[in-house]
Image (cartoon, rainbow, N blue to C red):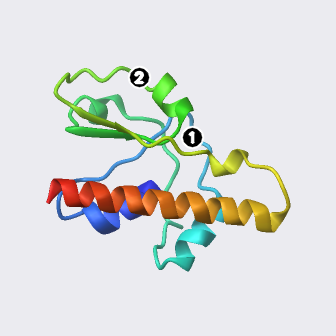
């Protein structure tokens, strides 16, 4: 979801890449709730962090405690680092509507954070 909003709102300021510690695939619920907001992430893929890209970035955003705690070290000490302490909606349990509502809530939080970052960068 963050990559989708990053590409939509930050594409004129940055090349947006995403990756994780493990590749899990793109969650269909994430695709659905992003589509509700007019952002198509269906063609995005789940990727493991690329060390070559990480060595050449100016800004890194981690999205949950797991990412912050297990993210590989960033060789460039001048990198701006942000941590958006979000819950992982894929780990939430409940009925279908509760889970979708969690995905929507996290989607909205990510969107706001990306817009805040856009304001800072512009």
- Classify mark 2: residues with Cα within 10 Å, few (<14), some (14-19) or many (20+): few
> Visible in this render: residue 107?
yes
Q: In the picture, residue 73 is in which quadrant? A: top left
List x then y, in percent, for residue 60.
Answer: 31, 38
Q: In the picture, residue 98 is in which quadrant? A: bottom right
Q: Which mark is residue 23?
A: 1
Give the side of residue 52 with respect to residue 37, left or right. Answer: left
> Visible in this render: residue 28?
no
Q: Which mark is residue 4?
A: none
Q: Residue at point 61% right, 50% down?
A: 25
List x then y, in percent, for residue 45.
Answer: 50, 54
Nearer the observer, disc 1 or disc 2? 2
Q: In the picture, residue 49 is in which quadrant? A: top left
Query: How many numbered discs?
Result: 2
Q: Residue at point 42% right, 63% down?
A: 111
SS for dot 2: loop
């Amino acid at each position: 979801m963050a990559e989708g909003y990053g590409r939509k709102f930050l594409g004129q300021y940055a090349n947006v890449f995403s990756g994780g510690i493990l590749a899990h695939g793109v969650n269909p619920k994430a695709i659905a709730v992003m589509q509700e907001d007019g952002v198509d992430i269906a063609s995005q893929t789940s990727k493991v962090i690329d060390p070559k890209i990480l060595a050449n970035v100016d800004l890194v955003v981690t999205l949950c405690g797991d990412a912050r705690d297990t993210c590989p070290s960033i060789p460039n000490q001048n990198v701006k680092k942000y941590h958006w302490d979000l819950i992982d909606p894929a780990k939430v349990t409940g009925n279908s509507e509760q889970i979708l509502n969690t995905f929507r809530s996290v989607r909205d939080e990510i969107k706001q954070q990306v817009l805040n970052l856009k304001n800072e960068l512009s």
